[in-house]
Image (cartoon, rainbow, N blue to C red):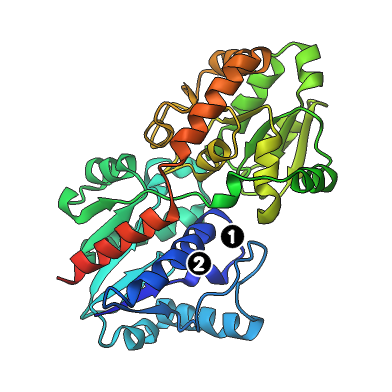
Amino acid sequence: MKVVYDAAPLLFRSAGVKNYHHALLEKLLPMTGPAGVEMELFPYLPGLTPNDNEQSNYPKLQTALRLAGILASNYVGYPYAAAAAKGASVFHMTQHLQRPPDGVRLTTMIHDPTPITLPKCHTASNVRYFERFVRDVLPRLHSIITPSEAVKLELVNELSVDESKIHAVPHGVEPDFYEVTQAQFQVARETYGLPQHFVLFVGSMEPRKNLERLAHAYDMLPGKLQAEYPLVIAGTTGWKNERIRVRLEKNKNVRLIGYVRRELLPAVYASCAAFVFPSLYEGFGLPVLEAMAAGAPVICSKVSALPEVTGGGAMLVPPEDVDGWAAGMMKVLSDPHRAKVMADAGRQRARAFTWTRTATETLDFFLAAAR
């Protein structure tokens, strides 16, 4: 049985989605042979290489040629994917591919439907891309993976997808988030100028992350507490964020440190006094899981997949409740016992999520799709 896995996200400068594919494939590829599955990585990738969030995981020429093939397929109908799909039982595509091949069972992962349900949080091009996917590709899919039951329910209710086609397979968290050395703490503090104590947010700076409300809530904390616990915003630039950036920079106790290198991310999480994640919607919420694994007390939104993922291991606050966010931060920062109980509960909850589990359930998904 042959499965073609669309690994095109590994060719881009990216964090969240790229990390998902790389972490999954690291565990999945060694499982395929013993299961009688031949897996090829599309677009004609030679194998898995080390992950790099700052650029393609492959040499520049290889990357350019493969992206050109995808563009030619999307815009002029060049049979780039069709050739790869020959002899395959399953073609597991991403939304980068607008013209998937015929004559093979198509599957995909839908991380979240927010380009349709929250279009104001996306760029116009992202919305158009997803609308085209829903119109042209979604009806052709044999089966779909989602990262949570919350996304599964949303696809059924908002996009009228047959529930029997959808399989929720949660993400995992890598082992190094549980074990941070003193040397890593020191390097992280020196690299990013981290204060002794701080409140942390990790994620792209874009409307869905709800950072303006977080800034308002943080401003409500007593000045002495803000000085003792600066708010550190870590992550990529994102989009539609000019007003967000201006709002954050009004407070001298807010620090924008930008993208954090993957090898230092566990130490940054583990260094914070509280991790805050006020997102308006998450298909899974991997930063929340990573923060829990690293032992940070987590305060996150009471929406979408986040209650499902945290499972009692975090404090939940409605994303629009600015007073609630301020109160939540006050409770955690002023009560070390509460913070420790939350941190312990979060770490225990995080242990239920491993990439081995994700890979095993994904392989089962492919075997079922091929039957």
Percent x, y of residue 100: 32, 75
The earlier-in-sequence mark between 2 and 1 is: 2
Percent x, y of residue 39: 35, 78
Q: Amino acid at mark 1?
A: Ser
Left or right: where does residue 335 sit relative to residue 248?
left
Report whether residue 6 is seen. Answer: yes
Residue nearer the viewer, 161 or 357: 357
Left or right: where does residue 166 sit relative to residue 306?
left
Residue nearer the viewer, 360 or 94: 360
Left or right: where does residue 1 sit relative to residue 171?
left
Percent x, y of residue 308: 37, 34
The residue beneath circle 1 is 14
Q: Residue at horizontal 32%, vertical 39%?
A: 150
Q: Are marks 2 and 1 in contact (CB under 8 Å)?
A: yes
Residue nearer the viewer, 224 or 263: 263
The residue beneath circle 2 is 9
* Above or below 210: residue 74: below
